[in-house]
Amino acid sequence: MARSKSAEEGDVVTIKKYANRRLYDTERSCYITLEDLGTMVRDGREFRVVDAKSGDDITHNVLTQIIMDEETRGETLLPVNFLRHLIGMYGDKMQSMVPQYLEASMTAFRKNQQDVRSAFEGALGSNPLAELTRRNMEMFQQAAGAFMPGAAGGKAKDAEIAALKAEVAELKAELAKKK
């Protein structure tokens, strides 16, 4: 996860939530949305949300609301059976262990994800097929993007794909000569 410089230094942004549901970023002195907070989370930016009137820390509630909003936008991350099991844990004797278990599981998942990325990038390192593989991955990503809703298709993308195909063909020819 990318971390901003100030988050690494321990700075925690205070966000005030007012009775009218508006969120105020005290660092930037402006109103923000739940989407902005989601972006801050993805950027690794630390923040805490406090109720403007009482001063109570309501970060947990706001983060839960962000998850709810993300889940209702279409692509769900949390499977129904997981949610059922999670709800079933409330009031259970093991309830106090669940947060630590989930946090440790997520930490392990993120580490494994980073290890896979590093291994993949290492595999593309300095071997003769690295450039060809990198270009093929770019073409694949662009082709996949063409099928996503809202993706900017069109003549510019087609021309770019054609140019990449020509480069791949050229690289293949060069590799064939070296064999």
Image: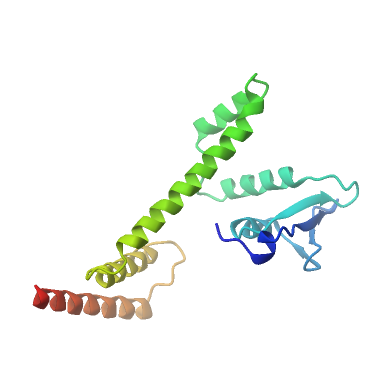
Q: Residue 96 at x, y = what percent?
A: 66, 27
Q: Residue at x 91, y 49 (%)?
A: 53
Is residue 54 shown left or right of residue 143?
A: right
Among all residues in the image, which is located at the extreme top? Answer: 93
Q: Residue 174 at x, y = what percent?
A: 15, 78
Q: Quadrant of residue 36?
A: bottom right
- Residue 63 lies, with reference to residue 135, above or below; the image says above
Q: Residue at x 62, y 28 (%)?
A: 97
Q: Quadrant of residue 158?
A: bottom left
Is residue 166 shown left or right of residue 102?
A: left
Q: Which part of the image, by quadrant, shows the N terminus?
A: bottom right
- Residue 139 lies, with reference to residue 55, above or below; the image says below
Q: Residue at x 65, y 49 (%)?
A: 66
Q: Nearer the viewer, residue 166 or 111?
A: 111
Q: Nearer the viewer, residue 141 or 113?
A: 113
Q: Give the tally of numbered discs.
A: 0
Q: Residue 79 at x, y = what percent?
A: 50, 37
Q: Nearer the viewer, residue 168 or 81?
A: 168
Question: Which colour style is shown?
Answer: rainbow
Is residue 13 shown left or right of residue 54?
A: left
Q: Quadrant of residue 87?
A: top right
Q: Residue 63 at x, y = what percent?
A: 68, 47
Q: Which part of the image, by quadrant, shows the C terminus?
A: bottom left
- Residue 144 lies, with reference to residue 113, above or below; the image says below
Q: Residue at x 34, y 61 (%)?
A: 122
- Residue 61 lies, with reference to residue 160, above or below; the image says above
